[in-house]
């Protein structure tokens, strides 16, 4: 929700950069892996893209999903 932006901005303004504590402060609904795998068996929703190599892998995965 847009209302969370202010809370996250306050953390950034304090110099906090850690993502996990910020997200946990928002009281998310945490799902067990088996529940997520029912909708996303290969956990492709969580592909990490921080490097050129990871981007290339993500692009290959997307291309394989296209008809």
Image (tube, helix red, strand yellow):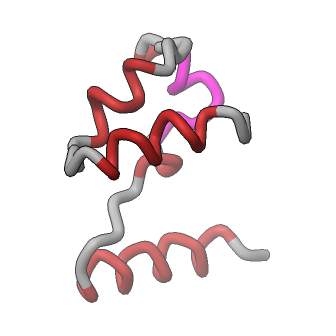
Q: Position of residue 1 (x, y in %)?
A: 72, 34
Image quarter of the C terminus: bottom right
At x 29%, y 32%, the residue is 20
Residue 65's place in the image compared with 18, above or below, is below
Of residue 38 and residue 51, the one placed in the foreground of this image is 51
- Which picture quadrant has residue 35? top right
Q: Position of residue 30 (x, y in %)?
A: 47, 14
Q: How many marks?
A: 0
At x 69%, y 33%, the residue is 3
Q: Mainly helix, strand or loop, the magenta region?
A: helix
- Whether residue 38 sits left or right of residue 37 in the image: it is right
Of residue 63 and residue 22, the one placed in the foreground of this image is 22
- Whether residue 18 sits left or right of residue 63 in the image: it is left
Q: Position of residue 36 (x, y in %)?
A: 53, 24
Q: Position of residue 18 (x, y in %)?
A: 22, 42
Q: Residue furthest right?
A: 67
At x 27%, y 72%, the residue is 50
Of residue 30 and residue 2, the one placed in the foreground of this image is 2
Question: The magenta stretch spans which residues?
Answer: 35-42
Q: Is residue 40 magenta?
A: yes
Residue 52's place in the image compared with 29, above or below, is below
- Whether residue 9 sits left or right of residue 15 in the image: it is right
- Whether residue 50 sits left or right of residue 46 in the image: it is left
Of residue 21 and residue 5, the one placed in the foreground of this image is 5
At x 60%, y 22%, the residue is 38
Residue 12's place in the image compared with 3, above or below, is below
């Amino acid at each position: 929700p847009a209302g969370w932006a202010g809370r996250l901005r306050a953390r950034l303004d304090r110099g906090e950069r850690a993502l996990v504590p910020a997200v946990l402060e928002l009281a998310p609904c945490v799902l067990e892996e088996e529940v997520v795998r029912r909708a996303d068996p290969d956990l492709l929703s969580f592909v990490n893209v921080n490097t050129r190599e990871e981007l290339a892998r993500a692009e290959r995965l997307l291309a394989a999903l296209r008809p």
